[in-house]
Image (cartoon, rainbow, N blue to C red):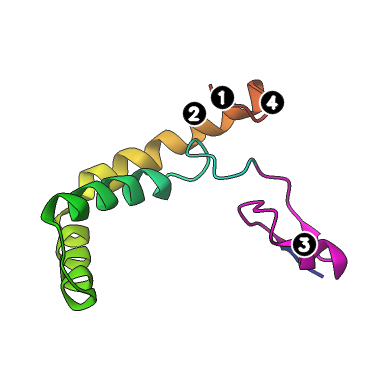
């Protein structure tokens, strides 16, 4: 037996229909999913460079991902315990 954590997107109805145990988790919570902050930064950086085709999009995404400083990732990871406690205190709402 296992428990699955996912983003609570409503289209994942097959999970409940097939008796999969799902961890309760706020949908797309940036407080509990630090990677969401990095995806936002990546999206903004790529958008500014205006890729004109799929090959260019892939190249730019890789370049911009490599430019994300390690310190930013460390800061997000370090914020996780505080964010988790804040989310629990606010009963799953953004705080």
Residue 35: x and y in percent read 40, 50
Assign a secondary structure to mark 4.
loop
71 and 11: which one is in front? 11
Is residue 16 in the magenta section? yes
Mark 4 or mark 1, whichever is nearer to me: 4
Query: Which comes before the other along the chain, label 4 or label 1?
Result: 1
Residue 24: x and y in percent read 73, 46
Judging by the rendered image, the residue that carries numbered circle 2 is 82
41 and 48: which one is in front? 48
Q: Residues within 10 Å of mark 3 (few under 14, many from 20)?
A: few
Judging by the rendered image, the residue that carries numbered circle 1 is 86
Mark 1 or mark 3, whichever is nearer to me: 3
Assign a secondary structure to mark 2.
helix
Mark 4 or mark 3, whichever is nearer to me: 3
1 and 52: which one is in front? 52
- Magenta range is 4-25
Judging by the rendered image, the residue that carries numbered circle 3 is 13
The quadrant the N terminus occupies is bottom right
Query: Which comes before the other along the chain, label 4 or label 3?
Result: 3
Q: Quadrant of residue 94?
A: top right
- Marks 4 and 3, how far apart at CA: 24 Å
Report if residue 67 is visible in the image: yes
- Marks 4 and 2, how far apart at CA: 14 Å
Q: Quadrant of residue 4?
A: bottom right
Disc marking residue 91: 4
Q: Are marks 2 and 1 in contact (CB under 8 Å)?
A: yes
Q: Residue at x 55, y 45 (%)?
A: 28
Assign a secondary structure to mark 1.
helix
Q: Residues within 10 Å of mark 2 (few under 14, many from 20)?
A: few
Query: Which comes before the other along the chain, label 4 or label 2?
Result: 2
Query: Which comes before the other along the chain, label 2 or label 3?
Result: 3
């Amino acid at each position: 037996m296992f428990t699955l954590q996912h983003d609570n997107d409503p289209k994942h109805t097959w999970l409940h229909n097939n008796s999969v145990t799902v961890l309760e988790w706020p949908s797309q919570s940036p407080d509990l999913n630090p990677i969401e902050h990095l995806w936002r930064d990546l999206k903004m950086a790529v958008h500014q460079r205006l890729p004109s085709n799929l090959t260019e999009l892939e190249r730019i995404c890789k370049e911009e991902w490599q430019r994300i400083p390690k310190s930013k990732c460390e800061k997000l990871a370090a914020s996780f315990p505080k964010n988790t406690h804040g989310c629990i205190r606010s009963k799953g709402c953004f705080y």
